[in-house]
């Protein structure tokens, strides 16, 4: 089981950019320790399912799919589906989850408790790999209850060990240690497999070393190593030698670490397992880097990249890019170091995006599966009731026919049955339409979250670039401006989250409308000050034009949300050196018009029409303005809620004006 170890290593290797070269040794040690833990956990699963321990994952997947295609819905199919989930759980967890879910459902339907126990354990590993720790723990607890009912000591130990691993990766070391000790109390009882003991001892060793209890950590790791040697498991022996090497590396005993890692590399090379060999090469290169042997460290790192890239082991490639950056930095070859650092950042962004997409996809699949199961259960129950009703009806019809006087009654019953079936069909069609609309709305909301969260987070990444830039130039004045820039980026992120919350609340109908008198000049001045930092950064001028006595009768929260979104959008699409005009003027019939005008590129008429379409949720993707349009959608909804109107006037190459009309407080 791997869970979310790679996400911690990605965060760690970002620190050298922010903290400086002097912090690199400690960060590399910690990151390599986490990476080694991930490799050991992967090998433990290979030991637990030895059928595929020495087989290429893609070949195993193809063979299993071929067998599943012809296997009937029996206990053999349960085991094939569980094996498919296992084969893919590490390299493609989102692809593995549907197979695991199918195995669990089929095992429960067949009352195959042994197959269900195996399926729950493997499926929990897949959810842990996409960082869904709570659901992984839920599956492990179900496996524990089932193992106790079956008096399966091996299953109990594996469940406790699995729960300990998830808690460890989530940072809850106290709960992790409690679960590991519960497993340890049963580890030497009859029926506990050696692979399960190795998994427990390896995890305990890793946790104790993480807690700085080095002697206990070395004791359990060596115990796992002895078991691997005793069972002639060369891969396991290699991995635990490498893990011991990583421990001695963290203890700064570089000679011992180098010897252990070279021994581990010698054992794993004949096995042709590129994932493990790449990890060992990377760790040995780190030791050599610490010893000052930069030439061999570079060669081994390049070999690790060559092994990791073809099998899409991108976390290992990321570690290699980081080490190459440090090697060239130590040589003072800064141009080459910058090249490797840029490759690191590009790959790091891709891995983070992929991780988030996997988590969202798996979560959506889980919810959709639950909805489909509920719908199938509902339709099955209704079908059963309909069949039962029809049987009763035909019994009555037969009795009436035999009595030669029931034609009238039979005809009435048939008409009522036909009407009931038509009503049921109409109800079913309405429910289907509602489900489709709900699914479409949910998909659009996921799209909004995935798209709009990227912008504010990128702003924070831009601050780190400014820090490097100002430090290189020695620009103290620029450094003093950075807190304002960070504050503005945080405000932008908060604004997006506020929009999402407002949208969710508005959809439930729980948003209260509480109007009051709002002085317009104070309101516009407040919002102009809020965005002054962002405007200054782009050299944009914000001008306010409003009579001092003008006031509106509106809800403060809704109105500020409208204006914040419109001003933020104007800043986004106004070029450097442009101007944004905030204007308010009284209109006839007791109305006030608030206008936000930018000097950007403007929009074509078809794009303006799409923005004003009441049925539109997602903005068009063409043209100079793009995005999800959630902010404008909120503006439209909040304006209508207050009895106002929203208008857009835009001319290409001349700018855009968005006007909001609200009631005058002095009418």
Image: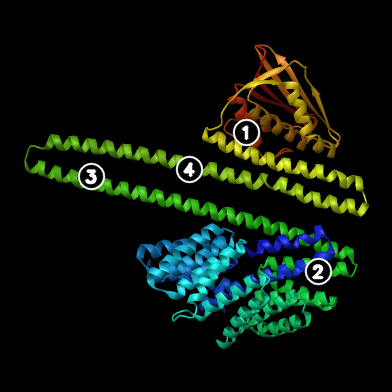
Q: Earlier in the sequence, mark 3 or mark 4?
A: 3
> Does 508 appear above or below 513?
below
Classify residue 405 as left or right of residue 190.
left
Q: Earlier in the sequence, mark 2 or mark 1?
A: 2
Q: Examine the rendered structure and indicate whether residue 3 appears above or below residue 287.
A: above
Q: What residue sits 41% from the left and 40% below the top?
A: 431
**Which residue is farthest right?**
474
Q: Which residue is under mark 1?
A: 633
For marks 4 and 2, the one nearer the N-term is 2
Query: Secondary structure beneath disc 4?
Result: helix
Give the number of the mark in front: 4 or 2.
Answer: 2
Q: CA distance from mark 2 to mark 3?
A: 75 Å
| Quadrant position of residue 396 | top left
Q: Are marks 3 and 4 in contact (CB under 8 Å)?
A: no
Q: Which residue is mark 3?
A: 389
Residue drawn where x is 69% and y is 41% of the image: 494
Q: Is 11 in front, or is 346?
A: 11
Residue 554 x, y percent position in the rendering: 64, 22
- According to the picture, the residue beneath numbered tag 2 turns out to be 324
Q: CA distance from mark 3 to mark 1?
A: 49 Å
Q: Give the mark nearest the N terminus, 1 or 4.
A: 4
Determine whether 616 is above or below 387 in the image.
above
| Residue 126 horizontal/vertical position (percent) | 54, 64
Seen in the image, is 225 located left or right of residue 11? left
Q: Quadrant of the N terminus?
A: bottom right
């Amino acid at each position: 089981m791997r869970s979310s170890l790679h996400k911690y290593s990605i965060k760690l290797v970002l620190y050298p950019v922010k903290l400086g070269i002097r912090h690199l040794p400690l960060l590399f040690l910690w990151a390599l320790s986490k990476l080694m833990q991930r490799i050991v956990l992967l090998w433990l699963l290979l030991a637990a399912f030895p059928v595929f321990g020495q087989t290429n994952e893609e070949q195993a997947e193809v063979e299993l799919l071929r067998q599943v295609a012809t296997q009937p819905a029996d206990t053999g199919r349960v085991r094939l589906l569980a094996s498919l989930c296992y084969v893919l759980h590490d390299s493609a967890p989102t692809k593995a989850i549907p197979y695991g879910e199918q195995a669990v459902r089929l095992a429960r339907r067949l009352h195959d408790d042994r197959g269900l126990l195996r399926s729950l354990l493997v499926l929990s590993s897949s959810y842990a790999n996409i960082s869904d720790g709570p659901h992984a723990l839920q599956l492990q607890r179900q496996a524990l209850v089932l193992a106790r009912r079956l008096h399966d000591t091996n299953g109990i130990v594996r469940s406790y060990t699995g729960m300990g691993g998830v808690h460890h990766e989530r940072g809850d070391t106290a709960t992790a240690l409690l679960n590991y000790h519960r497993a340890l109390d049963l580890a030497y009882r009859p029926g506990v497999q050696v692979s399960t003991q190795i998994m427990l001892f390896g995890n305990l060793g890793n946790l104790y070393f993480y807690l700085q209890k080095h002697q206990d950590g070395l004791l359990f790791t060596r115990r796992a190593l002895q078991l691997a040697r005793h069972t002639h498991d060369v891969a396991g022996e290699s991995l635990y030698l490498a893990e011991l090497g990583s421990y001695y590396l963290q203890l700064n005993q570089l000679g011992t670490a180098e010897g252990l890692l070279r021994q581990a590399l010698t054992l794993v090379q004949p096995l042709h397992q590129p994932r493990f060999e790449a990890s060992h090469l990377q760790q040995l290169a780190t030791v050599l880097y610490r010893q000052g042997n930069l030439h061999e460290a570079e060669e081994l790192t390049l070999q690790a990249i060559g092994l990791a890239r073809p099998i899409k082991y991108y976390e290992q490639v990321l570690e290699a890019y980081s080490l190459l950056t440090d090697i060239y930095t130590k040589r003072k070859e800064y141009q080459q170091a910058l090249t490797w650092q840029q490759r690191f950042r590009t790959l790091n962004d891709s891995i983070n995006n992929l991780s988030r997409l996997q988590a969202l996809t798996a979560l959506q699949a889980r919810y959709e599966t639950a909805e489909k199961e509920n719908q199938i259960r509902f339709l099955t129950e209704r079908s059963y009731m309909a069949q039962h009703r029809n049987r009763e009806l035909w019994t009555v019809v037969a009795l009436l026919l035999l009595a030669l006087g029931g034609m009238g009654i039979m005809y009435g019953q048939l008409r009522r049955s036909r009407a009931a079936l038509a009503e049921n069909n109409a109800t079913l069609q309405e429910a289907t339409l509602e489900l489709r609309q709900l699914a479409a709305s949910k998909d659009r909301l996921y799209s909004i979250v995935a798209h709009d969260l990227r912008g504010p987070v990128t702003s924070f990444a831009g601050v780190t670039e400014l820090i490097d830039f100002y430090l290189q130039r020695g620009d103290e004045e620029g450094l003093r401006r950075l807190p304002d820039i960070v504050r503005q980026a945080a405000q932008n992120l908060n604004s997006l989250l506020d929009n999402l919350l407002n949208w969710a609340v508005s959809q439930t109908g729980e948003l209260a409308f509480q109007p009051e008198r709002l002085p317009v000049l104070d309101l516009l001045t407040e919002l102009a000050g809020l965005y002054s930092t962002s405007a200054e950064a782009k050299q944009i001028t914000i001008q306010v034009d409003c009579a001092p006595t003008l006031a509106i009768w509106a809800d403060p929260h809704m109105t500020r949300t409208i204006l914040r979104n419109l001003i933020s959008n104007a800043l986004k699409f106004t070029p450097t050196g442009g101007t944004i005009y905030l204007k308010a003027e009284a209109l006839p019939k007791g109305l006030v018009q608030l206008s936000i005008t930018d000097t950007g590129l403007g929009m074509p008429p078809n794009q303006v029409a799409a923005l004003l379409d009441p049925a539109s949720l997602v903005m068009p993707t063409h043209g100079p303005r793009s995005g999800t349009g959630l902010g404008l959608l909120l503006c439209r909804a909040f304006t209508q809620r207050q009895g106002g109107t929203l208008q857009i006037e835009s001319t290409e190459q001349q700018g855009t004006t968005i006007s909001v009309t609200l009631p005058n407080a002095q009418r």
